[in-house]
Image (tube, rainbow, N blue to C red):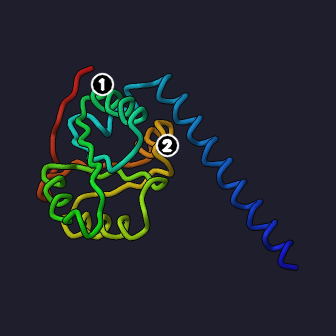
Amino acid sequence: MDHVNEYAISLARMKAHTHALALELDAMENMLQRPADWSEGICGRTLLYVGGRPRSNTVIRALVTRSGGTLVSYAGLIDNDTPLSRFVRALQGVDLVVCPLDLIDPDSLDALRYLCRQHGVPWCEPRSSSVASFVTHMQKKAMPRTTHGRPTVRACCH
């Protein structure tokens, strides 16, 4: 009976992974076909990107910049040797923290989530540090346009 349950769990995980990959492919196609629609939520925003991979980060930075936004990278570890105050300083002036889930340990993830909540900075967690995962998450992430409770008006021309 255990093998049946293990098989069912494995099958469910594979289906979920396949679904996520299909969503990412669709998001990339949408971005390429309608780049203005994709960049709408990024224009005039500062995103703090935690971790990632050098090649993907370069492409993500270019996409954000081309969309009228700013990408700030945070690559420091969250452990006993690196104080959390370094991350808190990085949060200053940030509109959204983006932290891919594939390259971070659970304790660091919990600490970063807590700090974002504590400082009122929205947080999102793409499935992976791939460009496609970032694009997918940004397409479905509605970033509120507010500053201190008031709507913010920003214009972007591409």
Residue at the spot 58% in from the left edge and 35% down from the top edge: 26
- Residue 105 rendering spot, x and y as whole percentages: 43, 63
Q: Which residue is mark 1?
A: 66
44 on left or right of 79: left
Residue at the spot 30% in from the left edge and 24% down from the top edge: 66
11 on left or right of 95: right
Q: Is residue 40 above or below residue 152?
A: above
Alpha-carbon neighbours of circle 1 within 10 Å: few (<14), some, or many (≥20)? some
Amino acid type, mark 2: Ser
Which quadrant, please, contains the N terminus? bottom right
Q: Sequence order check: which comes first, mark 1 or mark 2?
A: 1
Which quadrant, please, contains the C terminus? top left
- Residue 78 rendering spot, x and y as whole percentages: 29, 63
Q: Is residue 67 above or below residue 150?
A: above
Residue at the far front in the pictured view: 81
Residue at the spot 72% in from the left edge and 54% down from the top edge: 15
- Residue 13 rendering spot, x and y as whole percentages: 69, 59
Quote the CA–CA distance across marks 1 and 2. Answer: 18 Å
Q: Which residue is mark 2?
A: 133
